[in-house]
Image (tube, helix red, strand yellow):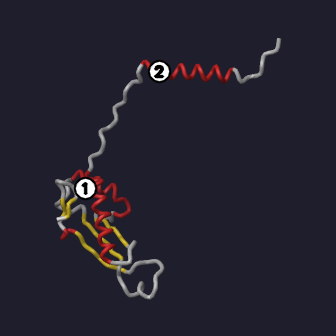
Amino acid sequence: MITITRRIAIDPAELQEDFLRSSGPGGQNVQKVESAVQLRFDIRNSPSLPDDVRARAERLAGSRLTKDGVIVITAQRFRMRERNRDDALERLVALLREAATPPPPPRRATKPTRGSKERRLDGKARDARTKAMRGKPVSD
């Protein structure tokens, strides 16, 4: 089991890995070796995730989410297949951990205190006096 949080873990059988050739510059090796990893996780049909976490994860996935509800993560940073597999899995776990953290409570609007109102008005008056001194002197 792949641990996401203390309460959430996903079964490795829910993940599908495809290997493909990495893009970008390389020597003779790049045309022969399939070191890039494409990790797929069907988030909509996963029994491991609670509904609220699933909804937040779909929102966080953005363009990595297909119409069918599959998260696709492509990793090709490294030259070795194993490191790319680990990288893709780490990125999926990070996304699911972020989705598992509950959103902060909504902010309640409060009235400004009397002291904060007075301090604001005193500052405005002080600035007004400073700016009034910048004018041309009045000649008699």
Q: In which quarter of the image is residue 77?
A: bottom left
Answer left or right for 130 relative to 124.
right
The crowd level at tag 2 (other Cα within 10 Å; few <14, some 14-19, many 20+) is few
Q: In which quarter of the image is residue 111?
A: top left
Q: What element carries label 1?
A: helix
Q: Which disc is residue 117 wearing?
A: 2
Q: Which mark is residue 88?
A: none
Q: Where is residue 39 in the image (x, y as percent from the top left)?
A: 30, 71
In the picture of the structure, the residue carrying the numbered disc 1 is 54
The three-letter amino acid code for the residue at tag 1 is Arg
The local secondary structure at tag 2 comes to helix
Rendered image quadrant of residue 3: bottom left
From what the image shows, is residue 88 above or below residue 94? below
Amino acid type at mark 2: Lys
Q: Give the vertical position of 114 relative to 25 (above or below).
A: above
Name the quadrant of the C terminus.
top right
How far apart are the two marked residues, 1 and 2, measured between alpha carbons?
A: 44 Å
Q: Which of marks 1 and 2 is nearer the N terminus?
A: 1
Q: Residue at x 29, y 63 (%)?
A: 92
* Side of 134 relative to 98 (left or right): right
Left/right placement of residue 73 relative to residue 138 reads left
* Circle nearer the viewer, 1 or 2: 2
Q: Where is residue 136 in the image (x, y as percent from the top left)?
A: 77, 22
Q: Which residue is drawn at 46% across and 85% down?
A: 27
Is 90 or 56 nearer to us in this picture?
Answer: 90
68 or 54, which lies in front? 54
| Residue 53 spot, x, y in % from top left | 24, 53
Q: Quadrant of the N terminus?
A: bottom left
Q: Residue at x 27, y 58 (%)?
A: 96
Image vertical order of residue 70 relative to residue 34, above or below: above
* Name of the residue lying farthest toward the top: 140
